[in-house]
Amino acid sequence: MKLSIRFFNDHEVRAVWDDEHSKWWFSVLDVVGVLNEESDYTKVRNYWKYLKAKL
């Protein structure tokens, strides 16, 4: 397992490489924060909880 920090529009996005499945897994909270251009972790977490409840 390989841990990595990727940058997207100057925002950090945490990622993990899964050797078994040959896939990258990204932090949902980091991706939601980048897409909403929000850097406050608490706001991102609350927004993700709201979205997840709507699914």
Image (cartoon, rainbow, N blue to C red):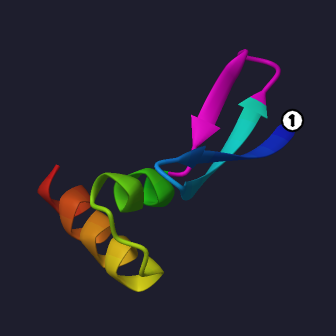
Neighbor class of circle 1 (other Cα within 10 Å; few <14, some 14-19, many 20+) is few
Residue drawn at x 31%, y 52% is: 35
Where is residue 25 drawn, in percent x and y?
A: 61, 36
**In the figure, is residue 29 to the left or right of 43?**
right
Residue drawn at x 27%, y 60% is: 36
**In the figure, is residue 5 to the left or right of 33?**
right
- Residue sticking out furthest to the front: 10
The quarter of the picture where residue 54 lies is: bottom left
Q: Secondary structure at mark 1?
A: loop
Over which residues does the magenta segment extend?
18-27
The quarter of the picture where residue 52 lies is: bottom left
Where is residue 1 drawn, in percent x and y?
A: 87, 35
| 26 falls in the magenta region | yes
- Residue labelled with disc 1: 1
Residue drawn at x 42%, y 81% is: 40
Where is residue 20 drawn, in percent x and y?
A: 80, 18
**In the figure, is residue 55 to the left or right of 39?**
left
Amino acid type indicated by mark 1 = Met
Up-down relation of residue 38 to residue 9 (above or below): below
